[in-house]
Image: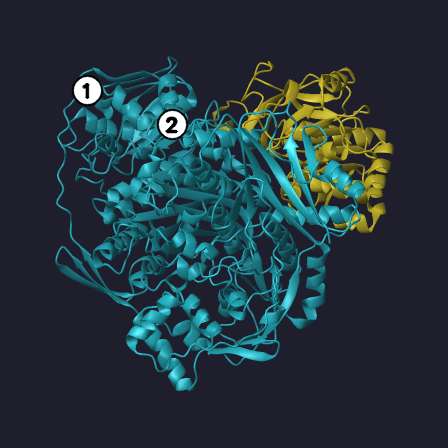
Amino acid sequence: MVEVKAIVLRAAGINCDMETEYALELAGAKTQRMHINRIIEDKTLLEEFQIIVFPGGFSYGDDVAAGKILANQIIHHLSEPIQKFIDDGKLVLGICNGFQVLVKTGILPGNNSTKHQEETTITYNDSGKFEDRWVYLAPQTNKCIFIEPGRQIYLPIAHGEGKVVTKDSATLDKLKSEGLVAFKYVDKNGQEGDYPINPNGSTDSIAGLTDTTGRILGLMPHPERFVRPTQHPHWSRLKEKPASDGMTIFNNAVKYIQENF
Amino acid sequence: MRQWRFEVFNRSDFSDVHGKSVLEDIKELGISSVQAVQSAKVFLIEADFDKNFAERVAQELLADPVCEEYYIGRSGAPAGLAKATLIEVHLKSGVTDPVADSVMAAVADMGVKADNVRTARKYVLLGEITQSQTDTIAKKLLSNDCIEDCVIGNEAEPPSPHLKPYELQLIHWPIRELEDDELTALSKEKDLFLNLVEMQTIQKYFQELGREPTDVELEAIAQTWSEHCVHKTLKSSVDMSIDGKQVHFDNLLKDTIFKATKQLDKDWCISVFVDNAGVVEFDADSAVCFKVETHNHPSALDPYGGSATGIGGVIRDPMATGMGARPIANTDIFCFGEPDKKLEDIPKGVLHPRRVMKGVVAGVRDYGNRMGIPTVNGAIFFDDRYLANPLVYCGNIGLIDKNKCFDNPQAGNLVVVVGGRTGRDGIHGATFSSGEMTHEHETIFSHAVQIGNPITEKKTLDVLLQANKAGLYEAIADCGAGGLSGAVGEMGKELGVEVNLEKVPLKYAGLSCPEIWISEAQERMVLAVKPENLEAITKIFDDENVESTVIGKFTNDKKLRLLYKDQQVGELDMEFWHEGVPKYSRKAVWKSPQLTEPSIPEKDNYNDELVRILSSYNVASKEWVIRQYDHEVQGGSVVKPLTGVNNDGPSDAAVIQPKFNSDKGLAISCGMNPLYGDIDPYWMALAGIDEAIRNLICVGGRADRIALLDNFCWGNCTKPETFGPLVRAAQACYDGAMAFEAPFISGKDSLNNEFACEDGTRISIPSTLLISAISIVDDINKCVTMDAKRASNLLFIVGETKNELGGSHYYKINDQVGANVPKLDLETAPKIAKKISAAIAEGLVVSCHDCSEGGLAVALAEMAFAGGLGIEADLRGLPKSKDCSRVDMQLFSESNSRYIVEVEPEKYDAFAKLMLNLPFGQIGKVTEEKILLIKTEDGKAVIKADIYSLKQAWQKTFDW
């Protein structure tokens, strides 16, 4: 079997890289955290990896807008190697700030890394402030390799800018008809609702997006923060140890590489 | 070079979240005529690019293509709408502007080097408002005069700060011939905050040297000798009169708090009271260090910047402890005036408490979250005596290799400064925080406010951890109080050091030698590096765009030598500079106040009282604050600050798992209750210690591995009657530490928290002692939380309830203080803590909550609504003292050392056996019906309330 190798991209202000590395290692991927400067210096570095993760944090302080400065850096320095990575059939995961970066480079939705972001963006929460809380997520697609179809999962969000918006309703319709919506925020029973069920006011309760190949996923919630039962917010009152929902995403990624490379 | 101006607005069909929140704040100011607020970001970029490129910068970088639009140039007021007022807020020249730095880098990524970037915020207020209302909005809400300038209307922005380079002027301040009154006047004129004896000591030193001091020498001495840096008061010799009885201490700290630590002599204490933070063993390979600091005066002037740099500063303490720790958790505890205060009741020079609170919370949020450190524990206390002197305590815990807990600078090492650049911000921070505040402080001490850039600190942390691992430096210090003077001086204390001030990298030109040497600009660390390691360590820094510069070298002549372009500007003997401060001797007085217990009529039902206490500021849910902090980053949270079936009940303490591959945990808590201090600070301090320890025990912390921290915030301690209570509290710290065998490992004090109003009246804070505590959790899988777990489980109370309502919240809602302050039973309290800890470790307990503010009734209510279950309780089973006969006493007494414990029926015997010989009793059970029912001994329901209505009362206060 192929050795699964994952890279977690670091940059100034990225701060979820260690726990993301741990989650990938738990899933069985040999994982390396690497600063973006190293890849800009040597663009062939990405070639040995099959999974790239853009982790959470506040890249460059989220100055101007969340993920914007890092997205700008990627557009101007790393467009080609990342496009090649995608074209080679490899996997891209963006979590929280990483999701914001994927959207602001234009990589999500629709795998468009050579152009700029156009019709979808992520902006300030309706509440106007950063919030850390747990949310339920219902998968919206069968085609994204990271997602177990039909399995609702429970994960924490921690962001101030997580509201997904589209330029107009046509763009939204297109996201839906092309199956690009990966996850929606729902309540425990799987129903959409207002705040705090939808914690940031995201259009159509969108919590995550994928691309047409299903090999790119971006989401606001943090799967790397629920990889052990004791991370569940009220594990101490559950009779059975809760399943670590966040691991499904990492496990699926590793399994996909093992089966396809 | 051309300056391009960009304005970025929200598109009209997308909500302007910032504009909306400003509108809400304007309404809170009592101005109702503003109908809408539009906010915009302004970017001023000086660069040689053309209109086409400017369009690209706007489209690709500055404005979001979906929800924003831009205007290149200056847009006027929107036409055809209601009357519009334009207000623009610019940073004062020299104030750090992180966004500008990022934009500069991003424009460079696009292929053009900009010469300068500045940013501003623009607000368009729609509606009829008067000139004075505009001023109020601009000054009280949108800007802070310490760091920002407001431009009202369509005027030009402030000019760009092109400062002239500094030409060295060697300035001497003659003091050798001065008379005493002139010495005092000089200290005041130069803001040295040194008293006459200290000035005389300095005078004598220079008389002996046969020369006058230079400006930088005097400034360096003033910083090092400041109360903030050397804690003169706590180390002073004290003659204390306690109700007429005389007691003497040679050194207050050594005779109380240190003494307990020394006598306990725990082998798991690795480094206590010597480094930036106290260090205790965690496991075979690692240790944890913990430090709590205050940042009160800066937060009073600029709540956002003050608290942000408070947390930023305390994070650097573990980073500079030993050879450097990795920060793993933050704590924060605040004291504010009550937020519903009328604007006209706020003294001149003081910000409204609501604005202070919002700003302080936002500052901690933005800095802590950006650093990627979870903020896991805290508390907020409200009292109007904090109006002019809010207290902002920030704590940080770090994880460090056990073999790297000490550093070792050597002669010949290079002095390397790494991280942020030095600017004019934070000048006189250490001395400023050692004095009292007045209504004029806003203008006089604006330069003492520091502005942080968390990303610079995060970048610096990232590279320092790599350099530490590679073993490329010999010692590390952080630039905190006193700036380079403090950091380099402390490191070179036993050696000697020579610094070339012109080599220090500056944010902008024009800083003088004293400014460079004492600036408290943020995010700077100092390293001692062997010359042969310089290249390797510099590469680590360069690789991640972190600036580092060699500014001098350590010597072996025990002298500080400061040079500017080869000219000597200062020379001091290390011994005089660090040890020369004359020892204080202080008088202290404690007279027990003559207080009486109130007579409050007894009632048949206490539902109203319970609701009033639950919704009071101190007890009410702090979820509004807690959710704004990332308390889960780093993936180590085990017991989160909010818990229960809906993740919104109040946890007693936090537990984190510092290492991914070990089930060992760390419990973190705090205790504080200034209301008890109004009766007797001795019992206040013991109650704080017991509360902090109870909280640790409740979640599963070990009773035999507790380490404590003290943070004293007091009024003007030159007054014997203000200092007396502090001495009382320090004595209690000794007694408490000895009783629990819980040593103090670090501490800090902030004195002179007094405010002189314009009319001469003075506001002093109440005596405030924060106790922070940590302990080890052997197995995180055994942690318990405070929420009721399952119907038909049994509820016990362990610990005796006494007639101790002095300083209680029950008396507070009845506008009373009382006399019977809770008095800790030093013998029983540690026994109870040990037994509860053992019961949890043995798996006999499913939930545990301590009784604190609001007593038994509040604790039961919290357990019930956090668990989404009912509780039926019966006061018959309550272990109580003989004089605790009244029902209201039993419900609301705040006696210490009481724990409510939920036990499964089948574990009753084992639990009861373990509690044998302790005061405990079964008081009820958990029920399915969502009602809190408390019955008296004769079966009458004194509290009967729906748990959701109680929860709503508890939550609505801060439903902001």
**Residue A50: % across, % down:** 81, 37
Subunit of label 1? B
Q: Is residue A8 left or right of residue A88?
A: left
Q: Quadrant of the C terminus of chain A?
A: top right
Camera-nearest label, 1 or 2: 2
Subunit of label 2? B
Q: Which chain is cyan?
A: B
**Residue B619: % across, % down:** 34, 32
Seen at 85% across and 31% down, the residue is A89
**Residue B622: % across, % down:** 42, 32
Seen at 35% across and 54% down, the residue is B437
Which is more N-terminal, label 2 or label 1? 1
**Residue A145: % across, % down:** 77, 25
Please give the label number shown on residue B937. Answer: 1
On whether disc 1 and disc 2 are found on a single subunit, the reply is: yes
- Provide the secondary structure element on which disc 2 rests: loop
Q: Amino acid at mark 2?
A: Thr
Q: Quadrant of residue A1?
A: top right
Nearest the eye: B300 or B76: B76
Please give the label number shown on residue B36. Answer: none
Q: Which chain is yellow?
A: A
Q: Is residue B787 left or right of residue B674?
A: right
Q: How many marks?
A: 2
Read off the residue under disc 2.
B957
Q: Amino acid at mark 1?
A: Glu
